[in-house]
Amino acid sequence: MYDFEYQRATSVEDATAKYGAAEDARFLAGGMTLVPVLKQRLDQPSDVVDLGDLDDMRGISEEGGAIVIKAMTTHHDVNTSDLVNNKIPALAALAGTIGDQMVRNRGTIGGSLANNDPAASYPSAVLALNATIKTNAREISADDFFTGMFDTALDEGELILAVSFPIPEESGYKHFPNPASRFPIVGSFVAKSSDGVRVAITGAGPCAFRVTEFEDALSGGFDPDAIRDIKVSDDGLNTDIHASAEYRAHLINVMTRRAMGE
Amino acid sequence: MPSIKMTVNGKEVSGEVEGRTLLVQFIRDHLGLTGTHVGCDTSQCGACTVHVNGRAVKSCSLLAAHADGADVQTIEGLADGDTLHPMQEAFRQHHALQCGFCTPGMVMSAIGIVNDNPEPSETEIREALEGNICRCTGYHNIVEAIGAAAKEMKA
């Protein structure tokens, strides 16, 4: 790992000020991606601004029909939160599938979303639940947030503070794990609310995306049979040693039906 | 160079580290506590597992400076004199190790599992051990040891 200037933020304002003053800084949340990336010399920032002391960036609350999860909340805390388990159980269950015990004790929802790994689980929940990402500058809707592989709508130095998930009537998440890494080869999050049905997929493309053919079909009746015969195009899907684009397209249908309890 | 202080196995320790110094390097190289192992160095094998503020973490994926002010427990801090921690004793009784390389991480991870779930089923133990790799045992005796230790720790 190349060396860098380590800085510890005392507040959100202090974090963004330190970031802005540095030549080429990175925010450090749980470090479950950033530290391995630095160790492999895939990145060489001048400064790392550690958010670990910002306790007011942790916590889960219910606000006006939504569950608000602050950015530095760990996967373990989402997985074991009574509030999340009561209101959006699929989201709590999803958090329990990320990495392993030790990763869930450190990794954060804000870090995962800012990183936007193509196989990250959270982006599918954010998209399907039509969440809003609150940053230190603005609010970004889920549909505008994920812009490409490891790319988001966040501006340079913009910091995620919290994610607000509207509580759905019903939701579910299932993924087909890579047998070695356990990352989703394809994961599907399905959410039904008074505004209709939203289906979001992770692992299959450069970043999470919605499947509007499924959404339209399910809006007529929330039944897995409604999508059974819909073939999703494999155009633009990922192909690697683990799965071809064609296989991923097939899994999108299967995982979505399983997310609905089939 | 960040100067850091933390509590390791109940003792106050301090040191000067580089920003890039990992917690496991601080524990092994600065403090000489070599029971915490580096296996894969890519945050997959779990041999480096320690507890930070009561939670199991992979110390090869944490900056030492990030743990400034934290309460850290390593494998060396478990036994009470000659009396092994119930998890260590269960690993001994059930022969839950062969070469022993992964064992410190397995034991620290196993205690984290039981702390979160005092009565884990065999399936739950196997799933919760996902972050720890053992290349000798086939896991069978490790899973038995953790189940036995859970009963002992509850008693």
Image (cartoon, rainbow, N blue to C red):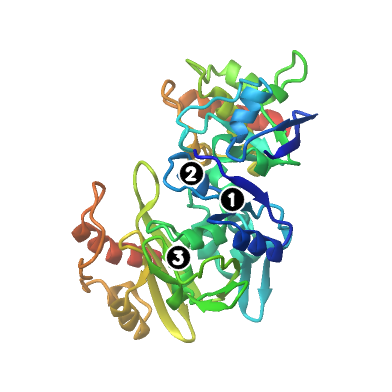
Distance between mark 3 and mark 2 Cα atoms: 23 Å
Side (left or right) of A16 relative to A123: right
Element type where label 1 sits in the image:
strand
Which of the two discs, 1 and 2, labels the residue nearer the N terminus? 2
Q: Which mark is residue B41?
A: none
Query: Residue at position x 41%, y 46% from top?
Result: A42
Residue B147 makes an appearance in the image: no
Side (left or right) of B37 relative to B26: left
Quickly name the residue at label 2. A38
Q: Are marks 3 and 1 in contact (CB under 8 Å)?
A: no
Q: Are marks 1 and 2 in contact (CB under 8 Å)?
A: yes
The disc numbered 1 marks a residue on which chain? A
Quickly name the residue at label 1. A48
Going by the numbered disc 2, the residue's amino acid type is Leu
Which of the two discs, 3 and 1, labels the residue nearer the N terminus? 1
Q: Which mark is residue A123?
A: 3
Q: Quadrant of residue B81?
A: top right
Q: Nearer the viewer, residue A257 or A34?
A: A34
The disc numbered 3 marks a residue on which chain? A
Distance between mark 1 and mark 2 Cα atoms: 10 Å
Residue A254 makes an appearance in the image: yes
Q: Nearer the viewer, residue A250 or A237?
A: A237
